[in-house]
């Protein structure tokens, strides 16, 4: 799910290499773990990287809601 979410939002991501690295490092993690890590980045980072993580998080949540 994480990789698919990344592919969906990649055109809107400014820091593509940073987000791609995050996706690669967390590909096998559970959705809850990924959300927790993204929320940590949003809380602790600043600038456009925060926006990029928010975009990714919103897409993951959208995908979760679509599955329900």
Image: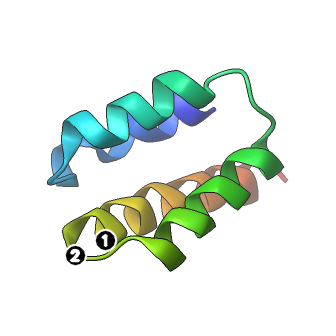
Q: In the rendered view of the protein, which quadrant contains the N terminus?
A: top right
In the depicted structure, whether residue 26 falls above or below residue 9:
above
In the depicted structure, whether residue 20 falls above or below residue 39:
above
Which residue is at a point 81% across and 51% down the rendered structure image?
32
Q: Residues within 10 Å of mark 2 (few under 14, many from 20)?
A: few
Q: Locate residue 14 relative to residue 60 in the image: left or right.
A: left
In the depicted structure, whether residue 14 falls above or below residue 42:
above
Which residue is the extreme one toward the front? 44
Percent of width and height locating residue 28: 71, 21
Assess whether mark 1 and mark 2 are in contact (beta carbons under 8 angstroms): yes
Q: Which residue is mark 1?
A: 51
Q: Locate residue 29 relative to residue 56 in the image: left or right.
A: right
Which residue is at a point 85% across and 53% down the rendered structure image?
68
Percent of width and height locating residue 27: 61, 24
Q: Locate residue 65 relative to residue 49 in the image: left or right.
A: right
Mark 2 and mark 1: span between their CA atoms?
Answer: 7 Å
Which picture quadrant has residue 49? bottom left
Query: Could you tell me which secondary element the residue under label 1 belongs to?
Result: helix
Percent of width and height locating residue 8: 37, 40
Label disc, if present, on residue 27 of the rendered structure: none
Is the image coloured rainbow, by chain, by secondary structure, or in one colour? rainbow
Which residue is at a point 43% across and 68% down the rendered structure image?
54
Q: Residues within 10 Å of mark 1 (few under 14, many from 20)?
A: some
Query: Could you tell me which secondary element the residue under label 2 belongs to?
Result: loop
Which picture quadrant has residue 7? top left
Q: Foreground residue, 10 or 15?
A: 15
Which residue is at a point 61% across and 30% down the rendered structure image?
26
Q: Which residue is mark 2?
A: 47
Q: Foreground residue, 64 or 46?
A: 46
């Amino acid at each position: 799910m994480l990789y698919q979410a990344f592919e969906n939002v990649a055109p809107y991501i400014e820091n593509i290499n940073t987000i791609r690295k995050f996706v690669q490092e967390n590909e096998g993690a559970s959705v809850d773990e990924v959300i927790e890590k993204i929320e940590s980045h949003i809380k602790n980072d600043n600038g456009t990287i925060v926006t990029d993580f928010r975009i990714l998080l919103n897409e993951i949540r959208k995908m979760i809601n679509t599955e329900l």
